[in-house]
Image: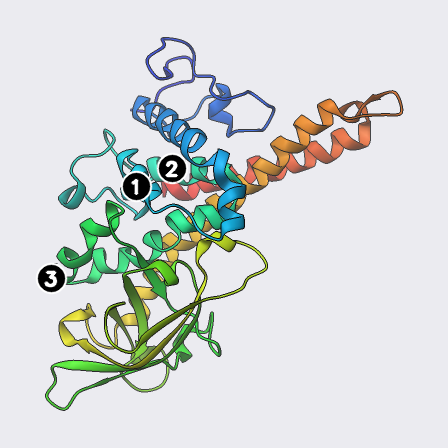
Amino acid sequence: MALSAAELLSAGTGEKNEFGEQVPWGDPSWYRGWNSPFYSASHVAYRAKVREFVEAEIEPYCNEWDEAKQVPDDLLAKAFRAQVLPALVGYWPTEYVGPGPENFDAFHELIAIDELSRCGSGGVLWNLTGGLSIGLPPVLHFGSQYLKDKCARACLTGEKRICLCITEPYAGSDVANLRCSAALSADGSHYVVNGEKKWITNGVMSDFFTVAVRTGGKGMGGISLLLIEKEMAGVECKQMKCSGVWSSGTTYITFDDVKVPKANLIGEENKGFMYIMNNFNHERWALCVQANRFARVCLEESIKYGMRRRTFGKKLMEHPVIRWKVAEMARQVDATHAQLENVTWQ
């Protein structure tokens, strides 16, 4: 049952639930002790756990990792031990990683994504979450037991990586008109995949690819999903030179006569468009959470700077026009977070 702000306890201290630095609008309202119907003591404990992980293991190194265009591989295992990685796929996959936070629900995932986004680096965040959170759910929801057993636990624990391959050089958001083809062999044992994928987050470091391919005719009715493995002959990955998110491993992938066993088909043939749209619901929600926390990080840093910087004999925050700008930013960030909580509740 959701508790009031006065009843929520922070990490067993027995104190009222005021969490964080208490910079105005620097955190969601329930962090500041406001009442909320959505959060329980389990959410409070999980929030503290994820923030501790982010502040100790991610925030101090973001600039270094962005400049290096990569993140240490052991961060994934650390994120698993902190109960972060399994929280990013839409539910807690107990069958592969054991029990998670008590009464795990969508608000635990909201907290995980929101807290991770406090690092302020899209590259670092997407390196950690960008492939797993969108590449693995189609396998978990629609894949055979064989495919789930092949990759689920290894990806959830950080031992291996997975990514989602939808976008192509000539078809991005227009999923129904993808060209990457998968032709069934004469004996029906495997598909032969040919085509290109572009802007694939985590592609260069991934072991598994959840790939949208054309197995049928034109339009949405001819799309399927295949699980392709990097070790298969004919798979080539090249890291792209991007103007930002350097450490996310954005990749150009070429499939040249790649033989993929028919057992690697995710769900049913020519039903892939429906699976992709289902997956987009969770993906877009997660991106909204990330974007809003990035905006909140900017707002928090603006307030801190405004309290330090002095112009014309007073602090920036003492100028009415600056206070108005901050209030307007706060209105948009808090309103968006409220809508996110409403969508999460649904």
Q: Which residue is mark 2?
A: 112
Displayed quadrant of residue 45: top left
The picture places residue 331, in percent across and down from the top left corner, at 63, 35
Circle number at residue 87: 1
Residue at horizontal 44 percent and vertical 58 percent from the top = 249
Calculate the distance from the C-alpha at mark 3 to the C-alpha at mark 2.
29 Å
Kind of residue indicated by mark 2 = Ala
Circle number at residue 71: none
**233 to the left or right of 39:** left
Label 3 residue SS: helix
The picture places residue 59, in percent across and down from the top left corner, at 48, 35
The earlier-in-sequence mark between 3 and 2 is 2
Q: Of 291 and 127, which appears nearest the observer?
A: 127
* Residue contact at pointers 1 and 2, CB within 8 angstroms: yes
Q: Which residue is mark 3?
A: 146
* Residue contact at pointers 3 and 2, CB within 8 angstroms: no
Q: Of 190 and 70, which appears nearest the observer?
A: 70
Q: Of 238 and 35, which appears nearest the observer?
A: 238
**In which quadrant of the rendered image does the N terminus lie?**
top left
Disc 2 crowd rating (10 Å Cα; few below 14, some 14-19, many 20+) is: many
Displayed quadrant of residue 317: top right
Q: How many marks?
A: 3
Kind of residue indicated by mark 1 = Ala
Calculate the distance from the C-alpha at mark 1 to the C-alpha at mark 2.
7 Å
Calculate the distance from the C-alpha at mark 3 to the C-alpha at mark 1.
22 Å
Disc 3 crowd rating (10 Å Cα; few below 14, some 14-19, many 20+) is: few
